[in-house]
Amino acid sequence: MLEFALGSGILVTVFVSTFQYGYFFYQYNLLVNAVNNGAHFGAMQIYDTNTATPTTAWTTAVKKMVLYGDPTGGTSTLQVKNLTTSNVSVTVGSTGSGATFVPTSVTVSITGYTIDGVTGSYVLTGKPAVTYPFQGLYCPDGC
Amino acid sequence: MVLMTMAICAIALIGAMGLAVDLGHIFIVKNETQAYVDAAAIAAALKMDGTTAGITRANTAATSLSAHWNFDSATLSTPTVEFSTASSGATWYLAANVTTALAPTMRFTRVTKTVAPNIYFVPMVMPTPVYTQNVQSQAIAGQVDFAANTTIPNGLGPFTGVTACNGSVTACENTAPNFGLTVGDIYDIQWPQYNSKRNNCGNGNGNGNGGKAINCFNSTPCPGDVTLDNGNGADPMQEVVQYWGAKTNGYWGSTSTSDINSYILDIQQLASLAMGTNIDPYLSSGNKQGTAAILDNRVNQDGVNYDISGNSGSGLQKLTDYLANTAHNGRRLMPLPMVYPNANNTTTVVGYAQFLLMTNISAAGTSDYYVKGDGGVTSQGTGNDPYCAIYAGAWVLGSTNGGVGSTSGGGRVRLVQ
């Protein structure tokens, strides 16, 4: 009985921590894939404004790509549990300003997303992040 | 006894669970570096333009991209970048080994990055422990040609490049990706005003009676087309005179001033095009007063809206200087359909090309080249003047330079592995 008590104490701790690590890794891996998809998609989209702040429609499409793997998604299943658009940050890298503004890259990162666990939780801030060079059409006056 | 059994089992269990943790870690690292090499391969493939300078820029684009790995805690940079003619089965060359002869054939780029994450549990059960595990990620991206039936809904400017090929559309297609033009030469993207009444225009189409096509315009066409003019019907000028005449000069955008911005600045198209499309119904004589200022606006949206070699520099010199200047942002480049006027009312799209718009300043300032006609190359402008531009090679969607080109002269960068 004593042995079981001692042994189970250690085993439970080991099992729980392994689960915790495994779950964290699993969620993080899903997030890496999701931001990768979103950034790649954003880099190929038509960019239709001449500032580093993209239009709402553009940002929404990229965020939906991250959330659902589909830029028009909304009813389909979330790729990562509890991920919301507010957790997805989209940044457009650029050169020039005003008339000479041109988008050069698209970065998608995860901010404020909490990965839950049995013994605690971990909040991801600014990671994972993926950057792709912009390769879409640039349409400064709006398309 | 139970305790001993449990202790032994526990070691095995911890080992197995440790394996799960280490492997999970390795998978994450693999995914992070894979995303990085994917992006780096695309960055490099966007820069290849058939020259060794382009290969160097491609190498720089990939190696200067940075990202993070190991849960975003370590920096990823300086991957191995190689170039090849095909995505598989061909030799891969480092940038330094790509010769001038090889450069025009390099269409694919392979980016490889190896990182070595620490492993913690697996070494415990190794006879000779190793505390890191190499993880290699690799991506291949290339300039993939637009297939003949690919429809282009937008992305092409409202002007045209006229091919220099003889006889048939098929013969013309076989001269891709440059369609008889020379990179760095200056060609008409909109032709000067046609006038059949001018002396020595012959019978109105440049042929016969001692006439020459070059005499049928109110203003001299751009130098590249003058060079190509051989008077035997195998050059752009002859075909333009013969089949376009007074009807059109190569413009195919809207003539409404309010729409011209979207055609020139946003490269929206009057109609979708594909190879083989007859563009003739969309061609018009255009609205030069409207388009000239907008073309200059497009030039002035570029960080390099000037030619450091000045007006007297050659087209090739201007193109080389432009591409070498890291401040250029691609706005001066305009992708255009390459067309072949092969009969009355038939002008076939045979491919695509990138053209560098002209400027008349040699340092930062505001260019008004197109408003002033041809900026003083041959005359000081009137509505009769041509719009000239420097042929920059094949078009790659989203690129800020020319491309390598293949059968259509146009393409996009894709990850192929």
Image (cartoon, coloured by chain):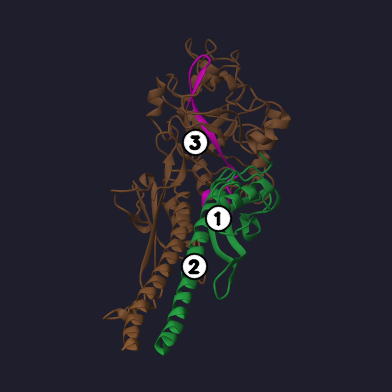
Chain colours: A green, B brown
Q: Looking at the picture, how far across and down is residue B334, in whole percent?
A: 57, 39
> Marks 3/2: CA distance?
51 Å
Q: Residue at x 57, y 25 (%)?
A: B250
Q: Residues within 10 Å of mark 1 (few under 14, many from 20)?
A: few
- Residue type, mark 1 in image: Thr
- Circle nearer the N terminus (1, 3): 1
Q: Chain of mark 1?
A: B
Residue named by callout 2? A23
Q: Chain of mark 3?
A: B
Which label sits on residue B353?
Answer: 3
- For the question of whether residue B116 can be seen, the reply is no
Q: Chain of mark 2?
A: A
B272 relative to B148 in the view: left or right: right
Residue toward you, A139 or B122 = B122
Residue named by callout 1? B326
Would residue B387 be counted in the magenta stretch?
no
**Range of magenta residues:** B323-349
Q: Are marks 3 and 2 on the same chain?
A: no
- Residue type, mark 2 in image: Tyr
Would residue B326 be counted in the magenta stretch?
yes
Q: Residues within 10 Å of mark 3 (few under 14, many from 20)?
A: many
